[in-house]
Amino acid sequence: MTINQHSSYTTMSAITDLDTLLASMHPIARKELFVFCTIPGQAYGSFAALAPIASFQEAEGLTLILERQAADNAGLKYDGLFSMITLSVHSSLAAVGLTACVATELAQSGISANVVAAYFHDHVFVPAARAGEALAVLTKLALRHASKAQPS
């Protein structure tokens, strides 16, 4: 696809209403394990061959989020293994409160959350050892809001 082509997703309306977002989200955990790596003195585009799922240029260096196997193969250091849970609702980048609600709900269960908002969805990276619990917490959050949205 070229930069001028548009997928069918671009015509969908992104949701901004917090209650609708929470009621509509369907958290899905990916099976791959992910890691966060930082490489001092590197710039965006470096290590592109490792196919990072995300990267961010910080003053201290280039941060990469990539599959554990890619990091291991490249000999990159990392702290911790993470599972990625996609919220599977087309959230607007202008929506207010989704990240806060998700992070608060996970924090109440003692689960850290590193949230990456992409164009269509929010992705939550949680410690891999707690992924099942995090998925359950987020599913319950969605169900609570869905039940509020149902007429009595």
Image (tube, helix red, strand yellow):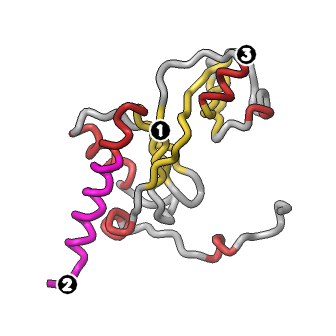
Residue drawn 68% across the image and 75% down it: 8
Quadrant hosting residue 22: bottom left
Report the residue marked by disc 2. 151
Percent of width and height locating residue 40: 68, 15
Quadrant hosting residue 133: top left
**Marks 2 and 3 close (CB-CB < 8 Å):** no
Mark 2 Cα-neighbour bin, 10 Å: few <14, some 14–19, many ≥20? few
Residue drawn 75% across the image and 26% down it: 43
Residue mark closest to the camera, 2 vs 3? 2
Question: How many numbered badges does the structure rendering display?
Answer: 3
Q: In the structure shown, which secondary structural element does the residue marked by tag 2 occupy?
A: loop
Q: Amino acid at mark 2?
A: Pro
Q: In the structure shown, which secondary structural element does the residue marked by tag 1 occupy?
A: strand
Q: Is residue 7 above or below residue 131?
A: below
64 left or right, relative to 149 = right
**Which mark identifies residue 6?**
none
* Span colored in magenta: 135-152
**Which mark identifies residue 83?**
1
Q: What's the CA distance linking mark 2 and mark 3?
A: 56 Å
Q: Earlier in the sequence, mark 2 or mark 3?
A: 3
Residue mark closest to the camera, 1 vs 3? 1
Q: What's the CA distance linking mark 2 and mark 1?
A: 35 Å
58 left or right, relative to 7 = left
Examine the residues drawn in magenta and state their main secondary structure. Answer: helix
Q: Earlier in the sequence, mark 2 or mark 1?
A: 1
Q: Amino acid at mark 1?
A: Ser
Q: Amino acid at mark 3?
A: Gly
Report the residue marked by disc 3. 41
Q: What's the CA distance linking mark 1 and mark 3?
A: 27 Å
